[in-house]
Amino acid sequence: MNEHVFWATDADLPQFDALEKDIKTDVLVIGGGITGLLVARLCCDAGFDVTLLEAGRLCHGQTGGTTAKITTGHGFCYTDIAKRFGKDGARLFFEANQMALEQLVSMAERVPCCLEKKDMLLYEKKDIRVLERELAVLHKIGVRADFVYPGELPFSTVGAIRYKHQAQFQPLMFLSAQLKGINIYENSPVVGLFEGGAVTADGVRVQAARTVVATHFPFLRLRGGYAFKMYQSRSYVLVLEKAPLPQAMYADGAGKGVALRSYGDLLLVSGAAQRTGTRGEGYRALEEFCRARYADARVVARFAAQDCMTLDGMPYIGRYARGLRGVYVATGYEKWGMTGAMLAAMLLRDEMGGHTHPYAPLFAPTRPLPPLRFLRETGAVLRHYVRPTAPRCPHLGCALRYNQQEHSWDCPCHGSRFAPDGRWLNGPAVSDLSKKP
């Protein structure tokens, strides 16, 4: 949980009491980030009685670390999706995210949230063939993207793919305007589910016909197999003043370089991604990059983002697991949580209303997984159980690693994080460490 959220400075986000007595509701949403709030908003608008439980403060988890780019340009993903799901699968993936983008922008246009229409450019630094392959797939599935040479970047590239009519906004200002009519309780961590509801850490029970787990990484230990088909990646953001501001949004299409966007007179530089719990350069890499290219700028803020990465690059949206009735999940947006969250909200609202959305099967959590990637991920998880000297994560017992830059104990298996004194910071674990490391 982030105590200091960059976006919260300009957002009037109200506070809510903790849940102290048993209640009953149509839809229970667990998690108060952008996914949980959008699911709750759309379900409320559809006529459901909705209750949302947040373990800490609204939007002070992973949503507090977003760079809030609203785009269908999810890196150079469409070539890989076409290989795995065919041309029709890639087309459906784009159409689903375009639907989400249009809905999110439409809602953002109705409230003050610093919404700006911007192009999104995905650049490539070395191999122009990567751009050519991706662009060929995009044209085959009917996407209007074009090749450009990005002249305003402070480094050389071989070109970029431009997605027009994308957007950026202030996420917490937007979300603070979406709360009306939702029964919201903060500081109410859910620690377990039962048939037809959930129970909090204080033993308070919520009966619900439908439950949505929107906790970023699903917190049920083994149901649904998410511990073996997903991991978390941590990336870092520096906020600069007195730096040249780009006219568009930028990202390295391969995910290895930096991403750029403006916010008012500030520049957000993000990147240095690494699997949570593994060694990496983190803020140091971004600081070195900014010193070399923005010598007159000053760092005024920094924060980190953590993203759930699936084995086939597609989110998990739908029924949590076979045999678990009335429980849904939304997770695994990779680095693109804005359209992912809205897509999840739209699909789950429709499913709860008895309407099977044509895009739903593509994102079903029970879909087959790529076998080789599944085996590699299983091996990556299991090797962290044989280190005897480290403190263990209460989620599934993985050996933790100490993060020197952020002063936290991080789980390389599933991404849980803990303060130096063992206090819980990020899930899927739901409790503090049993003893101080």
Image: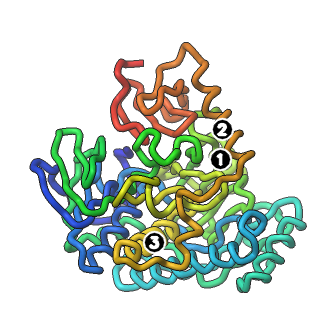
Residue visible at 85% across and 70% down in the picture = 133
In this picture, residue 325 sits left or right of residue 366: left
Residue extending farthest top: 389
The label shown at residue 112 is none
Which scheme is used to colour this image of the protein?
rainbow
Q: Nearer the viewer, residue 359 or 300?
A: 359
Place of residue 229 in the rendered image (x, y in percent of width and height, measured from the top left): 59, 47
The label shown at residue 342 is 3
Task: Check contact, mark 3 vs mark 1: CB within 8 A.
Answer: no
Q: Nearer the viewer, residue 284 or 20?
A: 20
Residue visible at 60% across and 57% down in the picture = 269
In this rendering, the answer to whether 343 lies above or below 210 is below
Residue visible at 49% across and 78% down in the picture = 357
Circle 3 SS class: helix
Q: Label 2 to label 1, Cα distance in Å?
A: 7 Å
CA neighbours of label 2 inside 10 A, class few (<14), some (14 to 19), many (20+) = few
Q: Label 3 to label 2, Cα distance in Å?
A: 32 Å
Task: Check contact, mark 2 vs mark 1: CB within 8 A.
Answer: yes
Q: Nearer the viewer, residue 332 or 243?
A: 332
Which residue does the numbered mark 2 point to in the structure image? 281
The label shown at residue 272 is 1
In this rendering, the answer to whether 75 lies above or below 401 is below
Q: Label 3 to label 1, Cα distance in Å?
A: 26 Å
Q: Amino acid at mark 3?
A: Met
Residue 265 visible within the image: no
CA neighbours of label 1 inside 10 A, class few (<14), some (14 to 19), many (20+) = many
Question: From the viewer's perspective, is the residue at label 3 or at label 1 nearer?
Answer: 3
Which comes before the other along the chain, label 3 or label 2? 2
